[in-house]
Amino acid sequence: MWGTPAPVIGAQTVKSASSMASKLSACGPLPDTNHQDFRIMTTIRQSDLIESIAAALQYISYYHTPDFIAHLAKAYEREQSAAAKDAIAQILTNSKMSAIGHRPMCQDTGIVNVFLKIGMDVKWEGFTGGLHDAINEGVRQGYNHPDNMLRASVVDDPQFARKNTKDNTPAVIFSEMVPGDKLEVTVAAKGGGSENKSKMIMLNPSDSVVDWVLKTVPTMGAGWCPPGMLGIGIGGTAEKAVLMAKESLMDDLDMHELLAKAGKGEKLSQVEEMRLELYEKVNALGIGAQGLGGLTTVLDVKIKMYPTHAASKPVAMIPNCAASRHTHFVMDGSGPVYVTPPSLDLWPDVAWTPDYQKSKKVDLNTLTKAEVASWKPGDTLLLSGKMLTGRDAAHKRIQDMLAKGEKLPVDFTNRVIYYVGPVDPVRDEVVGPAGPTTSTRMDKFTEMMLAQTGLIAMVGKAERGPAAIDAIKKHQSAYLMAVGGAAYLVAKAIKGSKVVGFADLGMEAIYEFDLQDMPVTVAVDAGGTSAHITGPAEWEKRIATGEFKGIKIS
């Protein structure tokens, strides 16, 4: 299993200076070594790089970083919103379960980002192609490991064919040449939920970055699975600002250290002051965990800057979700590198379980429109029985079939659909991690599904847009929210799984899940009231009163 150190493969240093000198002496007098720089260069072998990349991708699929765990634990301790606290409890429980079970913490196992700092004294050995080819082979092996198969999410030809590459290649790779004889590697997996909420703007030099962030964050909705962090890049050019925003998300979370520093009255840099200002003001928006309203929307805010044109101020912002996945390692030529797993003692003593006192049990096999219409925003439900699945590709195919008058492969009458693309199962699993996808992508299909198929309710992640809410109200339907960032936990409620339609679509096929007590929250009721609108509005007002300023955390 990845994360277990392997025997170190022998030293990979190029022939010593003395060996080189002996060979040179056969060709005549040696140069004056007092004036000649004989540098010993590190050699990186292709096989070691491939192994290190593959191991890192396995590692980040199931381990949160210790700094993230610590900050999320403090957010849980401080949270006063019952809905937000329950969501954070599910995320923390899911995180520890994934660490123990070595299975993905999120069903969206991401597109791979690799950042390389290549020492100028590094040499390469055994490469059968270019550096990027080796990294992509590491990605291929990492995603196809039989003990922890990861979901292939990358499609080639992003505009037209959008055909899945099946192994998550190619990675997005950034390289930088630096002094030294080491290879520094940062590996990150970026899911669509957070990446899709990225924002970029060209501000005027006198415009306020803080004002833009505070105006923009509410427009991002909750599809990026807060609580997470914001990475902000300021300066350079448009593409440089975006790159800095992404790079900043690789930094360790240290907001609590910064808060302590400010509390002691120590002098802060201007960047630190801006980070604190944004942290406090973004959280004061009341968006909260999963967008349901609460005290913590961001755990940290990171900022990187670069010189820019006198007439410009490019600014980019990228959120990192609750499934924060990245790691950093250094190769020195001594063999493959394996990152040390975090101790299980780092997780707080939080173990989410279904609350049978507060939550209503729902039998999907006998569900009626009248029962759906009785649900109210904020109600917590435990779903049992058979539920269908379907995402973007399935909805588009359903649309095309209905337009042609063709019969659908499944009957949606009085059924509930779950927006999910699960990870493939391993060992004795019936399904791999199966957390919800961002529901707004299905908004344009909602009227069709409710009007033409007999569907009566939907389950997904985050908010619904105006068109979907109007359709839900019109058809007396409901939208239920599952917690993003709790995919492994949610999957434990799935006791049976089979493909019942569009098998050629892979993870986008229509599945039928047999559930036992799957936890969801009513996010939009039959009257069109959305908890993602009412919740943040309520908590923004409450935070503004100052009633939570005295809350202490350890």
Image: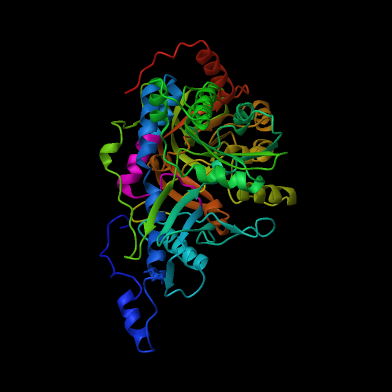
In the figure, residue 346 lies in which quadrant?
top left
Q: Magenta stretch?
A: 91-111
In the figure, residue 414 lies in which quadrant?
top right
Eyeballing the image, is 230 above or below 504?
A: above
User: Between 342 and 131, which is closer to the camera in this rendering?
Assistant: 131
Tell me residue 62's x, y (percent). 37, 47
Eyeballing the image, is 55 above or below 260?
A: below
Question: Which image quarter is the N terminus in?
Answer: bottom left
Q: Is residue 413 visible?
A: no
User: Between 537 and 441, which is closer to the camera in this rendering?
Assistant: 537
Tell me residue 277's x, y (percent). 52, 25
User: Between 457 and 213, which is closer to the camera in this rendering?
Assistant: 213
Residue 150 belongs to magenta span: no
Q: Is residue 85 visible?
A: yes
| Colour treatment of the image | rainbow
Eyeballing the image, is 551 above or below 463?
A: above
The image shows a total of numbered marks equal to 0
Q: Residue at x 27, y 43 (%)?
A: 343
Q: Is residue 132 left or right of residue 161?
A: left
Residue 95 belongs to magenta span: yes
Tell me residue 11's x, y (percent). 29, 69
In the figure, residue 252 lies in which quadrant?
top left
Question: Which image quarter is the C terminus in?
Answer: top left
User: Between 10 and 54, which is closer to the camera in this rendering?
Assistant: 10
Q: Residue at x 49, y 39 (%)?
A: 321
Q: Residue at x 35, y 21 (%)?
A: 553
Q: Is residue 60 left or right of residue 375?
A: left
Tell me residue 46's x, y (percent). 42, 70
Q: Is residue 185 left or right of residue 278?
A: left
